[in-house]
């Protein structure tokens, strides 16, 4: 899908197609009227398709961080244990979130660029009185994807443990099956794999998670309170004034996803990632994630190999209209990141790789 410049190959936001941009130019409507109810219903249908779920999916006015905050504010009780595999910047944020609500995080840690050992996670599930597990499915800071969801589900078995998953940076890019994998709460955002504008998050919630949230005696957030959100959701509304222009754009993006097809979108991103990884390795770059089976499709992270990332990123944008990203967190100066979460297809990726190679040759 050919895009207009600039080509944003960053972890998000993405370059939007004309259809989405034009949709956001529609007239503003009342968020308590029938037109909005139809818009909400259309979005809900598209979101269920994206999440591969029949659960309720709530629309949150706020970035992916707001969606994550909603999880901890409603579904994690004070004093209870929550298991968090910790292997990057966003998993560290999850630990901080747990502490803020008074929960007791049980951390299974791995070095950045790796994932915690499955056996260590299972040991915690078997031995500790944990009430939930929070998994970052794709760690944006390291380019590592947690591809052990089925194994975790099998390890839980009949235990009364809720599963929460952050798919902010890879839903619509990496295969993810909310219902098949019995994920109780799944969070994503608008500006990455779903193909929409930045500023919205979406949360899929199972019936048992909803019940736990509604019974939480210490829900601390007024804005992200699940009781309010669910009450208005049943009326096809949001509790507070929504970003209507963003919803228009998101509804159109979800229509495009349906037209392309879930499996086809996954395939396109997988092929893009394979092209990028092959190019980087042919140019002698070291891919950051240690094991190939955990390499992200959505965020490709590689070591800088003694080139100045600031200079390369600046020249690539100024001379070719392509933007890639610096490393993140403690990897900021060590790595560079390429986002593969937008509408780009083979033609755009070939243009990027040709441009990148030309630029690298001038700097060597």
Image: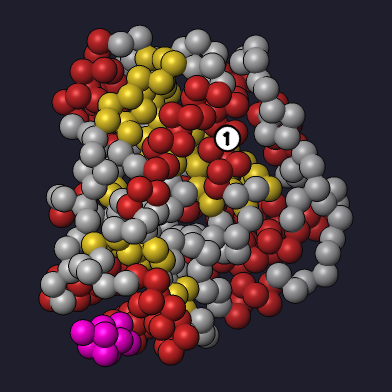
Which residue appears at 35% of the width and 77% of the height?
312
* Label 1: how many Cα within 10 Å (few below 14, some 14–19, many 20+): some
Residue 57 is at least partly visible in this image: no
Which residue appears at 26% of the width and 90% of the height?
362
Element under disc 1: helix
Q: Position of residue 278 (x, y in %)?
A: 17, 72
Reply above or below: 281 against 328: below
Q: Position of residue 142 (x, y in %)?
A: 31, 51
Q: Nearer the viewer, residue 255 or 359?
A: 359
| Quadrant housing residue 117 | top left
In the rendered image, which residue does mark 1 sit on?
69
Residue 81 is at least partly visible in this image: yes
Which segment is the magenta one? 354-364
Quadrant location of the N terminus in the rendered image: bottom left
| Quadrant housing residue 24 | bottom right
Q: Nearer the viewer, residue 205 or 356?
A: 356
Reply above or below: 287 against 203: below
Q: Position of residue 7 (x, y in %)?
A: 46, 79
Which residue appears at 26% of the width and 85% of the height?
363
Q: Nearer the viewer, residue 212 or 258?
A: 212
Would residue 123 be found to the left or right of residue 40 on screen?
left
Would residue 259 be found to the left or right of residue 349 on screen?
right
Would residue 87 be found to the left or right of residue 244 on screen?
left
Q: Position of residue 229 (x, y in %)?
A: 70, 34
Q: Is residue 128 magenta?
A: no
Main secondary structure found in the magenta portion? helix
Which residue appears at 34% of the width and 42% of the height?
88
Quadrant location of the C terminus in the rendered image: bottom left
Reply above or below: 168 against 280: above
Q: How is the image coloured?
A: secondary structure
């Amino acid at each position: 899908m050919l895009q207009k410049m600039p080509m944003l190959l960053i972890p998000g936001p993405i370059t939007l197609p004309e259809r989405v941009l034009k949709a956001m130019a529609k007239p503003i409507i009342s968020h308590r009227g029938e037109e909005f109810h139809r818009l909400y219903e259309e979005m809900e249908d598209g979101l269920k398709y994206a999440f591969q779920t029949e659960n309720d999916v709530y629309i949150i006015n706020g970035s992916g961080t707001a969606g994550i905050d909603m999880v901890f504010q409603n579904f994690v009780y004070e004093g209870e244990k929550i298991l968090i595999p910790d292997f990057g910047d966003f998993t560290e944020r999850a630990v901080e979130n747990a502490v803020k609500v008074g929960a007791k995080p049980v951390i299974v840690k791995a070095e950045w660029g790796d994932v915690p050992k499955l056996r260590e996670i299972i040991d915690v599930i078997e031995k500790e009185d944990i009430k939930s597990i929070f998994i970052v499915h794709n760690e944006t800071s390291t380019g590592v994807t947690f591809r052990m969801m089925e194994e975790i589900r099998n390890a839980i078995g009949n235990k009364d443990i809720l599963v929460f998953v952050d798919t902010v940076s890879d839903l619509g890019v990496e295969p993810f099956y909310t219902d098949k994998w019995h994920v109780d709460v799944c969070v994503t955002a608008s500006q990455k794999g779903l193909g929409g504008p930045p500023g919205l998050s979406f949360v899929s919630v199972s019936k048992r998670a909803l019940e736990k949230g509604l019974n939480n005696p210490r829900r601390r957030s007024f804005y992200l309170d699940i009781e309010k959100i669910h009450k208005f959701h049943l009326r096809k509304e949001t509790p507070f004034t929504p970003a209507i222009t963003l919803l228009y754009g998101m509804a159109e993006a979800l229509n495009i996803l349906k037209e392309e097809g879930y499996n086809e979108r996954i395939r396109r991103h997988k092929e893009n990632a394979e092209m990028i990884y092959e190019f980087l390795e042919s140019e002698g770059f070291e891919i950051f994630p240690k094991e190939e089976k955990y390499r992200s499709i959505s965020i490709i992270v590689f070591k800088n190999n003694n080139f100045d990332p600031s200079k390369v990123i600046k020249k690539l944008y100024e001379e070719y209209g392509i933007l890639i990203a610096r490393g993140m967190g403690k990897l900021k100066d060590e790595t560079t990141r390429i986002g593969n979460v937008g509408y780009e297809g083979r033609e755009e990726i070939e243009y990027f790789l040709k441009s990148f190679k030309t630029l690298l040759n001038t700097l060597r």
